[in-house]
Image: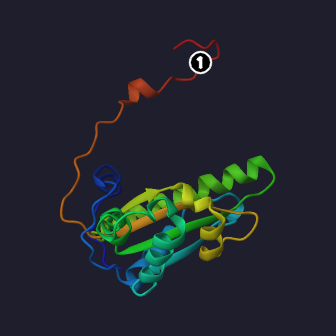
Amino acid sequence: MSLQSLSVREAVVGRRSIKKFNGQPVEREDIMQIIEYAVWAPNHQNREPWRMVVACGEELKELHQLLRNTVIPKWQDLTQEDLDKKMQKFTTPGAYIFVIVPEDVRQNIRLEDFAAASSMIQNLQLLAWDLGIGSCWKTPDFLDAPVFRKSIGAKPGERIIAMLQLGYFDELPKGKERKKPDELVTFFSLNGEE
């Protein structure tokens, strides 16, 4: 992986969620290398509570067909032109990564696994950004639809927690201001006062 040598701070502050991709494909090798490093996210007892389903290259056509025909039935009555316009948000990303986690019946384990997988997803986004690949983490309702779960290979006891769209882009969105630390932090005190 040839990194552009962004510092961690530059990557964290500079990364943007990309919602308008230019349709250029993302190479399978780049995705696999991003994943190779992303899995170094912290995770309790080194459980690595995630697995991924990737669609890139030829698989994208099958994913688009699944979305067009089975997952988005409310669009079935649209004209072909209107359907194509609606589908652009799904057809212009150059790759997809669906992140799947086990849903342990124990709440603390389930929450630990979700947090670890979320850290891994952030790693994916930062590593992709370092290669000039944009991403957007989405959680559309259809991730829980039985037909989609079956098609993506999600098993009983698993949850698809992310549809990560990846791709190249022509326009960098402007970042939104974040709250300042003094708005977010209260320093510990035994009597509850600062």
| Image-quadrant location for residue 20 | bottom left
Query: Residue drawn 43% across and 63% down?
Result: 77
**Residue 183, image x, y percentages:** 41, 24
- Would residue 32 be seen by someone viewing this image from the given angle? no
**Residue 173, image x, y percentages:** 23, 52
Query: Residue drawn 31% across and 54% down?
Result: 16
Q: Is residue 78 left or right of residue 73?
A: left
Q: Which residue position holds label 1?
A: 189
Looking at the rendering, in which quadrant would you find the N terminus? bottom left
Residue sitting at the far left: 170
* Image: 68 above or below 27: above
Q: Is residue 175 left or right of residue 91?
A: left
**Residue 75, image x, y percentages:** 44, 62
Q: Is residue 184 left or right of residue 158?
A: left
- Would residue 89 be seen by someone viewing this image from the given angle? yes
Query: Residue drawn 60% across and 57% down?
Result: 116
Q: Secondary structure at mark 1?
A: loop
Q: Nearer the viewer, residue 140 or 112?
A: 140
Q: Nearer the viewer, residue 62 or 116?
A: 62
Q: Is residue 49 left or right of residue 40?
A: right
Query: Residue drawn 30% across and 73% down?
Result: 3
Crowding at dot 1, Cα within 10 Å, few <14 / some 14-19 / many 20+, comes out as: few
Q: Amino acid at mark 1?
A: Ser
